[in-house]
Amino acid sequence: MAVTLFLPTVLAKLADGREIESTGDTVGAVVADVATRYPNLAPRLRDEAGQPYPFVTFYLNDEDIRFNGGFDAKVSDGDELTVVPAIAGG
Amino acid sequence: MATATAPLATQLEELSSDEILRYSRHLILPEVALEGQQRLKASRVLLIGAGGLGSPLALYLAAAGVGTIGLVDFDVVDVTNLQRQIVHGSKDVGRPKLESARDRLKDLNPHVHVEGFETRLTSENALEIVRDFDIVIDGTDNFATRYLTNDACVILGKPNVYGSIYRFEGQSSVFATEEGPCYRCLYPEPPPPGLVPSCAEGGVLGVLPGLVGTIQATEGIKLLLGIGEPLIGRLLLIDALTMQFRAMKLRKNPNCPACGTREIRELIDYDQFCGIGGDPLQDPNGIPELTPAELAAKQQRQDDFDLIDVREPHEWAIAKIPGARLVPLSAFTDSLHQFDSARDIVVHCKMGGRSAKAVRQLQAAGFKKVWNLAGGILRWSDDVDPKVPKY
């Protein structure tokens, strides 16, 4: 499945830009693919065990993946995966 | 939906002729009208923080005629605040933010009552402060206070209008309503300290808190009036660079310890929850430190050592310490082979946070003679060389 991963500006410098084209059957597979291609970005997306952090939310289209199986959530062709890390500035 | 404050229309205080004239553009809006304006006058809104988000929030809520605005802030106005904290002015530099904001709000709208709390919001005082308000607006600048604000709002059943910003991006939502999710449903735990730089370290576009703060003010007023569709169960993502606004779905997590299982019945130690053990710069897990005065003495003695600046090139262009070599933290791992472990190495950044990470990386790579410059180039400017500009 071809999926587009969207990064916030702050993480975009660790990859080639804000949009990354990737493939995989699940969110976890897409994240693993991106993590392999961009090793500096990898620790910002998931922990050493390959699991999601509680302070980085992934949206598959506009749904929080936590409510659809987390990294096991199935993806479809053309899906958009958006990474939203916690920020605290005010 | 129900309004956040629901006194009967007959119990609402009447508006004076002055107020009727002042709020005329509201009064002719059928969605606000006389009763809505009276409702705003009767309402009490608590702003956590009188900084970047708090500035437009306080200004617009005061202008709109919110009767009582509570402000929690213990900071003083610094000249670097003025690029975005528009409630304060140049004449206010050095004054407590509460005093400065109060004067500006009183000038803007003398009908508004400003209640100041010149304190840090803590687990000890939060419930007492929040209890007396109808809604809370979170404009703070750190994770610990955000979790504290969230939990206090969930425990007391007060809607929490959330906003946060970083560089060019912002987030907003409405948490802790009876039916909606809370901040912990979105982020169950904070990132470890140091992972997400503060605006002081990473920068923020000055107009961004204006964008996000006015969204929060809009949501606050909608809640008070009981109109429209508030951002309950939605996370609004704001990207100033692409000027795209996206609303993601937010669900209430049934296992959320705050609003789901309600395990959290009283406030906890939020510094501990956020992994802050005292001042991270003072005790960064045994990282050796050097003060700017000690570094200056080392330079005067012409000691043989390397001074490494781990800031970014655009910061290097603003100010530098003589004798330093630039190796940005973003490229630090790839540059470790350049360093000589036989030599003393002093590492610095703007305030000491990033350089502490660099020292840790060097230690992990086996370097023994490594020091972090306490307080970074800002303290160097204070203690040693005021000609080095602060930013």
Image: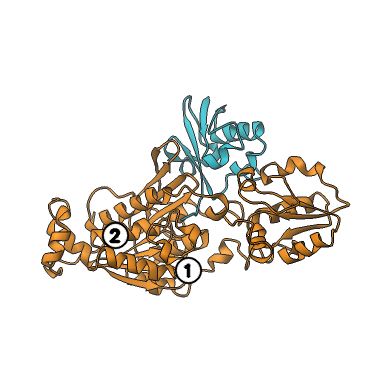
Q: Are marks 1 and 2 on the same chain?
A: yes
Q: Colour of chain B?
A: orange
Sequence-wise first label, 1 or 2 = 2
Up-down: is B234 above or below B296? above
Looking at the rendered structure, which numbered label has been put on residue B293?
A: none
User: Can you give x and y, in whole percent of width and height, for residue A59 in the image?
Assistant: 47, 39
Q: Colour of chain A?
A: cyan
Label 2 sits on a secondary structure element that is helix
The residue shown at (44%, 70%) is: B96
The residue shown at (69%, 49%) is: B310
Label 1 sits on a secondary structure element that is loop
In this view, the residue in front, A73 or B290, is B290
Closer to viewer: mark 1 or mark 2: 1
- Give the residue pinned by disc 1: B94
- Give the residue pinned by disc 2: B61
The amino acid on which the numbered mark 2 sits, given as a three-letter code, is: Leu
Farthest residue, direction front:
B387
Residue B190 can be seen in this image: no
Separation of marks 1 and 2 at Cα, in angstroms: 25 Å
Q: Is residue A33 left or right of residue B171?
A: right
User: Can you give x and y, in whole percent of width and height, for residue B373 in the image?
Assistant: 71, 60
Mark 1: few, some, or many residues within 10 Å (few <14, many ≥20)?
A: few
Badge 2: chain ID: B
User: Can you give x and y, in whole percent of width and height, for residue B66 in the image?
Assistant: 25, 63
Name the quadrant containing residue B72. Answer: bottom left
Name the quadrant containing residue B154. Answer: bottom left
The amino acid on which the numbered mark 1 sits, given as a three-letter code, is: Gly
Farthest residue, direction right:
B342
Residue A58 can be seen in this image: yes
In this view, the residue in front, B320 or B64, is B320
